[in-house]
Amino acid sequence: MDSSFLHRRVHSITGIVPVGLFLVYHLYLQLYLHSGASEYNERVNSFYDSPLAVWILILLVYLPLLYHSVLGLRLSAEANVQPQYQYFAHALYWLQRVSGVGVFLFMLGHLWNAKLVPALGEGSLCLTECANQHYEHLVAGFGDPETGLVTQAVYVLGVFGATFHLANGINTFCMTWGIALTPKGQFRVRIFSMLVFLLLTASTFYALSALW
Ligand code: HEM
């Protein structure tokens, strides 16, 4: 089998199954921001109580995410004008690539800000109590008089980019895997992906409104 054919398929499935499901679960957890600091921290931290947590993260989140990101960046660099696409399909083709690069950059900043900075604490490594105070860390970041507005803008763009990239990725996933080949089937997938985009974006902005 042609290796680029195989890579395209693995790239497509990693975007939807491990990475996409993680994103839906992760954004759902953010709704607990409305329940206050102790409930939010409890919900977020309880995942790490399991001895399997680190393996789940490595095998089901970080490795597929790394594969999906590296191949996605390569495919974006090879992107071309697609004369066979009509205007709307062409716009989505480019937006998928631009949002992918944007989400990749957002994630580097987000991992630094949401995982590493709390773990580094006040200049010294802290892997216990202070690393678990995610709610307090988010509130401080969003409310910082100097950098709060930049943090808020980065989160708004990052969430838009990630929800669009996942929802539109459902369409490209169906194309890559030969699902919904008829115009009627493709129309249904398009409607479904738009609903996913609207639902995920609305629920995440509702979650974030707890920090404003
Ligand atoms: C409402 C917007 C978001 C908020 C408030 C938020 C908050 C957080 C917090 C507090 C953490 C550290 C606690 C934890 O490990 O779960 C975290 C980790 C993480 N976030 Fe987010 N996040 C948001 C959006 C996103 C998006 C859009 C993505 C993906 C594009 C993302 C990907 C990740 C990843 C990969 C981790 C590390 C998970 C781990 O190693 O345990 N987040 N986020």
Image (cartoon, rainbow, N blue to C red):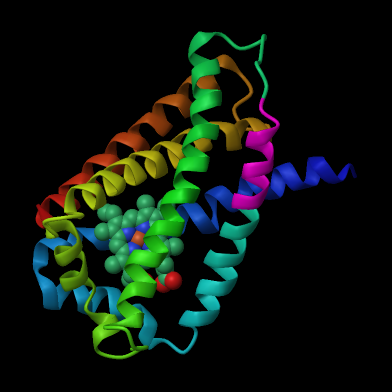
Q: Any magenta on residue 70?
A: yes
Range shown magenta: 69-79
Q: Is residue 140 above or below residue 152?
A: below
Q: Is residue 140 magenta?
A: no
Quarter of the image where one finds residue 137: bottom left
The overriding secondary structure of the stretch rendered in magenta is helix
Foreground: 111 or 150? 150
Quadrant (top left/top right/bottom left/bottom right) for the N terminus: top right
The answer to which of 200 and 63 lies nearer the viewer is 63
Name the spot of residue 47 as percent of width and height, x first: 36, 78
Could you say which quadrant of the image residue 167 lies in? top left
Choose between 153 and 188: the one closer to the eye.
153
Q: Position of residue 152 (x, y in %)?
A: 22, 49
Look at the picture and state if 56 lies above or below 141. Answer: below
> Left of 203 or right of it: where is 165?
right
Q: Residue at x 75, y 47 (%)?
A: 7
Residue 148 placement (x, y as % from top left): 18, 54
**Residue 178 can be seen, yes or no:** yes
Q: Is residue 103 above or below residue 47?
A: above
In this image, 32 relative to 197: left or right?
left
Q: Quick check: 89 above or below 56?
A: above
* Quarter of the image where ligand 1 sits: bottom left
